[in-house]
Image (cartoon, coloured by chain):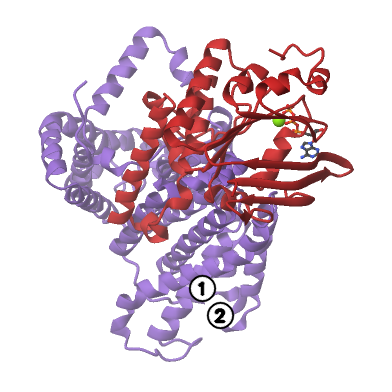
Amino acid sequence: MPLLQIKNMSHDFGGLRAVNNYNLEIEPGQIRGLIGPNGAGKTTIFNLVSGIYSPTEGDILLNGKSLVGLKPYQIAAMGLGRTFQNLRLWRHMTVLEHVKMARYSKINYGLLGAFFGTPKRIREEAEIEEKAHSLLKLVGVADLADQIILNLPYGAQRRVEMARALATEPKILFLDEPTAGMNPEELKQMMDIIRRVHRELGLAIFLIEHRLKVVMELCEIIQTLVFGEVIAEGSSEEIQNDPKVIEAYLGKETIL
Amino acid sequence: MQINNSLSPEKKTFASRIRNSFAQLPLLAWLCGVLGAVLLERYLGDPLTELLGLPKIPALFGAVTILKKPQLIPGTVAFLFLIYAVPILVIPRLFGSILNRLVGRLFHLSPAMSVAIHLGLLYLILSLWADVSGYRLLTLKLTLIAIIVTLSLNVINGYMGEFSCSHPGFLALGAYTASVFTLFFFVDDKVFGAAFLPKFLGPFLFPIALILGGIVAAIGAIAIAIPSFRTRGDYLAIISLAFMFIVKSIIENLEFVRGPRGLSSQPNYVDLPTVFIWTVAAVWIINNFVRSTTGKALNAVRDDEMAADAMTVNTRRTKIVAFLFAAFWAGVAGGLFAHVLRYVNPGTFSIQKLAEVLAMVYFGGLNSVYGSIVGAVSLSLLGEALRPLEIFKWIIIPLLLILVMIFRPTGLIAFKDFDVMKLISPKEKS
Ligand SMILES: Nc1ncnc2c1ncn2[C@@H]1O[C@H](COP(=O)(O)OP(=O)(O)OP(=O)(O)O)[C@@H](O)[C@H]1O
Ligand SMILES: [Mg+2]
């Protein structure tokens, strides 16, 4: 059984069909890529799967259980972690607090612990903190743990967002343009982090990218989305040589 | 911060030197300094007022005397300097390093004991200070209650970042519930007839009255929370404002609590230790909550709700729980309030009360326990001190608020964690 299965999913924004008859199957531990020009509907697919929108048609199954109609926090707790295209961070919180927060659904001390500082709460908070530190180390920002997030440079903020998504203990991680706006140095580091995360945590990754170079290097299978429809699917070679993909990307510098 | 930049360099180093010497003294040293001051006032206050030609010990740091009789200004200033400034500045300096070692020893022995000692000392200071006059005692009690009210509203308006106007309504629910409870069970009066239970039980069962008040306020809060937090959007401000007016007019029309005439002769259960203990409990529990990961979820919801949702935070539940929690404490504060004044009427819980509480929250600082304490204490005392100015009081206080909003839009001490362990730990020499 595939880890994530999307069947004939469509979504309309008013009269605009943003996603049309979309299908996807991801096996555990696989890295998949999704490319496509601006406005193709890539982020919409992420938002549909993570529960921000509800699909007009079709079904989404995670481990065989349908996600349609569930709230984002429930879907996240079931093992779907994600980052956002335009960073969504909590401006008054520290780096460590960001990662700790993503453990919310795994907290067992209840309101009693929250109000009275019971031993159970103290123990659990310490565990959460340790876990958060290890994730921050994994993405290479452990030394910034106590900084307010806004004081961090952009690249580091992206890494914190990644660590935060990992703290939800996802089985599959959705990354929406993780290298957007990065210089070549930061880009290379981010790709290393994605590889490291994949290797060490053994999770499946679904990656949206604008830069073909990144998806080509990281992903086993790539889909190309144009106007809400998949026009090509296959290995990076196949995609690269597909005339429809070349046409869709014609005149764009982003190609290679 | 901006002000520091405009200072000349030597002044800046002077200021920072002072700040450094302050920072090196443990909290215990300051408490000892203030204790010295209140003791000095207790034993030398009267002879000194005679010597300086003052009619009596200035009740609220001489503000009333100064405003009413300007010719007494020099005497009042001299009094304040000798009784307050000298011991508070001298004692911490003299005994600072000894006390710092003591604090260190205590901290390693048992932080809980250290907290208890600090609180005991604080209580001693407050009770000695309030002992001078009944007016001081009343002001102190109302100030402590204002801390609970302000902090609980800060949970909603600061930590959660919504705008709620319902606090006077919660206060009213708590005040009336607790009053009806004590009047019915422990008082022979015209409204509820003879006491139902032996009167000596009253003080022991009074916590139940307060908790019931809190629970009723929280139940009232459900009526706001369910429609307001169903969807994203700014319904809360309007619904909570309506709630405040509805509660007031319902009580006005309830004959069994004597409508607009209000309830009086509540038993005298709320002495200083009672208010002090409830205030400490409220600050402790609320601070525990807002510093837990469960409570920090409020900040996440405020700063980016979509991200909170995607990080497994049940945003609706988070908001509702926090809202009811805040209403509960406002209800408790209302019960205390009714038993301090021993009289309540619905008119107390109107838009003016709302303005007062909102001012304390925004003046003191959003998302901060320190801020709420500072806001509640400073505006309570200022409100009393400026009383002789009558109508001008209502010009000066709003002006002050506007100034704070201009220079510090989130309040004096905003977004600061209240870390008790750090507060009671010994200070390192820099
Ligand atoms: N909330 C919304 N309401 C209405 N239309 C929307 C909404 N979100 C997206 N759209 C539209 O749906 C289409 C797909 O948008 P989407 O953000 O999914 O594109 P994308 O592939 O992620 O593009 P980009 O590469 O720029 O991020 C666009 O035409 C966009 O304008
Ligand atoms: Mg997008």
Amino acid at circle 1: Tyr
Q: Are dots 2 and 1 on a single chain? A: yes
User: Which corner quadrant of the figure contains ligand 2?
Assistant: top right
Instruction: Give residue B257's mark.
Output: 2
| Image quarter of the C terminus of chain A | top right
Give the chain of mark 2: B
Q: Reading the chain from its start, which is encountered first: label 2 or label 1?
A: 1
Give the chain of mark 1: B
Relative to A36, residue B261 above or below: below
Query: Observer-nearest residue: A106 or B165?
Result: A106
- Spot the purple chain and give its letter: B
Give the class, few, some or many, for how many residues have Cα within 10 Å of label 2's Cα (few <14, many ≥20): some
Query: Observer-nearest residue: A21 or A168?
Result: A21
Q: Where residue B320 sits: x, y (%)? A: 56, 58
Give the secondary structure at mark 1.
helix
Query: Observer-nearest residue: A210 or A213?
Result: A213
Residue B351 appears in the rendering? yes
Instruction: Give residue B176's mark.
Output: 1
Query: Do labels 2 and 1 touch, CB within 8 Å?
Result: yes
B25 sits left or right of A220 in the view: left
B270 sits left or right of B372 in the view: left
B126 sits left or right of A162 in the view: left
Relative to B201, residue A120 above or below: above
Q: Where residue A227 sits: x, y (%)? A: 83, 32
Please name the residue shown 75% across and 18% down the image: A241
Give the secondary structure at mark 2.
helix
